Amino acid sequence: MFSLVRENIRIAFDSIRSQLLRTILTILIIAIGITALVGILSAVSALENTISSDFSSMGANTFNIQRYEFNTQRRGNEARKINPVINYRQVKEFEEDYVFPYTKTSIAFLGTRTAEIKYENEKTDPEVQVYGVNEHFIQNSGLEVETGRALNYFDVENSNSVCVIGSDLQKALLADVNPINKTISVRGAKFKVIGVLKEKGSTFGNNQDLRVLMPLQKARTIFTNPNINYSLSIKAEKKDMLEGAQDEAILLFRNIRGLNPVEENNFGIEKSDDLINRVGEMTSVLSKIAWVISVITIFGSTIALLNMMLVSVTERTREIGVRKSLGAKRRTIAFQFFIETIIIGQLGGLLGILLGILIGYIFAAAVDFKFVIPWGAMIWASIITFVVAVISGSYPANKAAKLDPVESLRYE
């Protein structure tokens, strides 16, 4: 039995080689559909993984109060609503008056994205981000200190000239020395490095490891722009307290902004879970597009493979007659053509998977996303190609098995 199966597989490969051009075209047609599916799903997975990872850096059980909502959009010709900046007086008032139990409030502002940091005779390119933060910022943002320590209450209250730096900044300036207690210069001001953050990577070209965190008041003496926009982040110790903490924060901040009960919020409030869910909604649309494209293409490839096998049966009618006259059974003939269809389908699927992964990888590398191997898409692609081969091969195999040996031998 095994030898017969092996012989049929050998005949199938011989047949594929004998009609190589037609086989290659059919494999390419199948591969196009699978490439569309795997390629788009690979890109979607990279997008979702990157954005979800970035938003989850807000920290667990945490929500932000910021100038705008994440999903602020224009409606028709309506101009986008301009919210006033969140200023220093407002964030300090919030910090002092917000007394919801078991919560920690962090305050932060971005001083600049283009700082040049110096250490002795070395300096960086002007691309370092500098933040003014309080003692809760690192924990509330889901960051971790790998070396040294974080900013504490006394650093912030006393406006100490200390800072915590990102891992890439440490590699750029302090790679050959112990960075702790080394002095760096930011816009002419000297700061002692007390900690180095654990690596976070980059998102959309924004390097999260190339930054300096310094005490809030100290940063305000360096960055004196009157329109600086601050943000608040509130972390609840328990997840079941998050809703209550958020409601209390909204009520307090509305009062601070001077809003009456009928006015809409002129600020945004976001939870990391909400952002990730919205990302999921957007990527699900792209996934559906991938399936629609691939289904249409795979339908075409099914027809192409079916036609190819019908032509193959017609061209090999005399061969079928000879095999039957020598004692070949109907199921043996059917199996020969069926296994040939399966082989062509799997070759097309394999090529499509490889091309799809390559496209996904190139896309992820081009836009600086975190590429992940799309195992789900690969499994579905393998299943689809097998189903396509079964559908396309069943009728030609059955037709070949039912051919009359006498009539087949007369075929020219």
Image (spheres, rainbow, N blue to C red):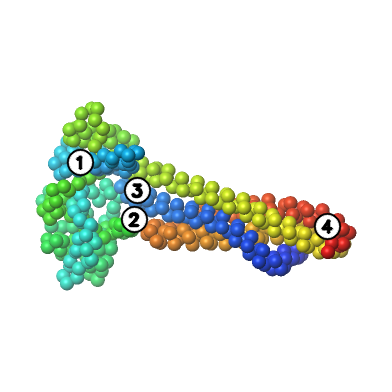
Disc number at residue 56?
3
Name the quadrant containing residue 115: bottom left
Residue 241 shows in the view: no
Q: Nearer the viewer, mark 3 or mark 2?
A: 2
Real-space CA distance between mark 1 and mark 3, rounded to the nearest whole angstrom:
27 Å
Looking at the picture, which amino acid does disc 4 mark? Lys
Real-space CA distance between mark 3 and mark 2, rounded to the nearest whole angstrom:
12 Å
Question: To which residue does mark 2 refer?
Answer: 203
Mark 3 / mark 2, whichever is N-terminal: 3
Real-space CA distance between mark 2 and mark 4, rounded to the nearest whole angstrom:
62 Å
Looking at the picture, which amino acid does disc 1 mark? Pro
Question: To which residue does mark 1 refer?
Answer: 84
Q: In the rendered image, which quarter contains the C terminus?
A: bottom right
Q: Residue furthest front?
A: 77
Disc number at residue 329?
4
Closest to the observer, 113 or 188 = 113
